[in-house]
Image: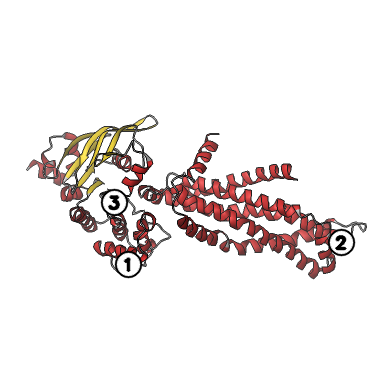
Amino acid sequence: MIKINNISKSFADKVILSGISGEFDKGKTNLIIGASGTGKSVLLKCIVGLLHPDTGNVYYDLRNFTEADKDIRSEVRREIGMLFQGGALFDSKNVEENVKFPLDILTQMHPDEKIERANFCLKRVGLEGANKKMPSEISGGMKKRVGIARAIVNNPNYLFCDEPNSGLDPQTSILIDELIMEITHEFDITTVVVTHDMNSVMGIGEKIMFLYKGNKLWDGSNHEIMDSGVQELDEFVFTNKVMKNLKNK
Amino acid sequence: MKGFGKYVIFMGSLFVRRETFMTYYHLTLEECIQIGIKSIFLFMLVSTFMGAVTTIQTAANLVSPFVPRFVISQVVREMTILELAPTIMAVIYAGKVGSSMAGGIGTMRITEQIDALEVMGINSSSYLVLPKIVASLMMYPLLVIVAAVCAIMGGYLVGSLTGTLTPTEYVYGIRYAFNEYFITFALIKSFVFAFLISSISSFKGYYTQGGALEVGIASTNAVTTSIIAVLLADYFLAYLLL
C-alpha cells in the first residue's frame, strides 16, 4: 500500500498541487484521473521521487519515502516498476536488453537467468520473439508492452503507469489496460495509473482519485463514479452528448 | 555565476551513488569506440590537410634567402604541436563529439529515459556522464597525437611533392632544436580540453527541457560554450605553463 499525506507542489508562483492525501491499495489498479494540466503527472513524479514535494510525505508500506535516507530510498526504488508515457525505452538497446536492464544493474543474477526472466516477461506481455528488435522498429503499442515488461522484470511491489494509453488506438488501449490489471492481480502489486482516458477509468478503475486544479475533489471506484455528485467530475466524465444523454437516462 | 554553480554541483553529482566498477568499465569502452575510433578518420583527414596547408603557407611567407628552408618544417612542427593539434582539433572535437553528447543526453532527457534510470534507483548523471568524461580523457590525447603525426606527415608529403623543400630539409627542420616539453604541454592541454568539452556538453544535454527544438539548441550551446571554454583555457595554460 502507498499512502500520500498532504502533498503540495509549486513551480515558482504557480501552485500545481495543494494538500493531496490518499491511499493506493495493494492488489488493485488505483487511478489518478483529471483533465490535462491538473497535476496528475506531477503527483506521480512526487510519489516516485522524481520531484520532491514542497510539503507532505509519501509512505511505501509505512516507510516514509520522502524523508528517508538514501539507503531506504534506494531500497524502495528497487521495488518500483514504472511505465512511462512514451515507453522511455533506451534507444541504443534492443528489446531484450531493455527488459533485462534493471536486472543487469540491480541484481547479481547469472546472465542466463536474466535472459530467462526477460523472456518470461516478454511472453507475459505477448511479445515473445521480439527480443532482438530495436525500439525504432516496433510500434507504439509494442513499446508500451516492452515498457511494462521492463517494469515488472524485477518483481516490483509497486507499479506506476503514466498515461499508458496515450497515442494508442482504442483496441490497443484496452489490451494495455487489461494487461496492467491482470499483472496487478497476478503479482498482487500496488498499481497506480495516471490517465484521462475514460475507457481506462471505466475498465480498470478499482480505486480512483479525481484531481481538479491541483486539488483532490473525489475518490471512489468506477462503479461509483456515475453518481459522484461532484459537478467537476461529472463535467470530466460526461464530456460529450452521448455520455450526457446516458447520464440523464 | 548561477550556471557555473549548477555545473559544479552537476560535476559533484557524478561521484555519488555510483554503480559497480564493471558497469562503468563496459560503458567507458563503448564510449571510447564512439568517441575515439569513430572520430579518427575525420581527425586524420583534417590534420593531414592542415599540415600540408601550413607548409605551403609558411613557405610562401619565408621568401628571404637568408632563412634556411628547413625553418619551414620547424615552424610547422611548433605550430602543430603547440596549437593546431590540441586546440584546433578541440574545436572539431567539440563540433563532432560534444554536439553528439549533448544531443544524445538531451534526447534521453526529453523522452524520459533519464527519468526511467532515476526511478530504477540509478544515479543517471553518474551512469551517463562519467563514462563519457573518462573516455574523452583517454581518447582525446590519443587523437591529438595522431593528429600531430598526420599534420607533420601532410607537410612532409606536400613539401616533397611540390619541391618546396627536400625530404632531408623537412626532416632536419622537424628535428632541429626540438623542445620535448612542448609535447608535455600539448598533452596537458588535450586532457584539459577533453574534460571541458565532455563535461560541458553533457551538462548542457542533461538539463535540456522541452522537445526536439530544445535538443538542437542544447547541442549548439554545448559546442559554443565548449569552444569558448577551450579558448580561455588555452590562453591560461599558455600563460601559466610556457
Q: Nearer the viewer, mark 2 or mark 3?
A: 2
Residues indicated by labels 3 and 1 sit on the same polypeptide chain: yes
Disc 1 designates what residue?
A: A130
- Residue at the left extreme, as displayed: A249
Disc 3 designates what residue?
A: A166
Instruction: Specify the subunit that label 1 lies on.
Output: A
Would residue B217 be visible to someone looking at this image?
Answer: no
Amino acid at circle 3: Ser
> Residue at the location (64% across, 46% down)?
B230
> Residue at the location (52% across, 34% down)?
B2
Amino acid at circle 2: Arg
Label for residue B69?
A: 2
Residue B109's place in the image compared with A17, above or below, is below
Judged from the image, the secondary structure of the residue bearing numbered disc 1 is: loop
Instruction: Specify the subunit that label 3 lies on.
Output: A
Label 3 vs 1, first from the N-terminus: 1
Residue A129's place in the image compared with A240, above or below, is below
Judged from the image, the secondary structure of the residue bearing numbered disc 2 is: loop
> Residue at the location (55% across, 53% down)?
B134
Toward which corner of the image does residue B176 lie, by quadrant? bottom right
Q: CA distance from mark 2 to mark 3?
A: 72 Å
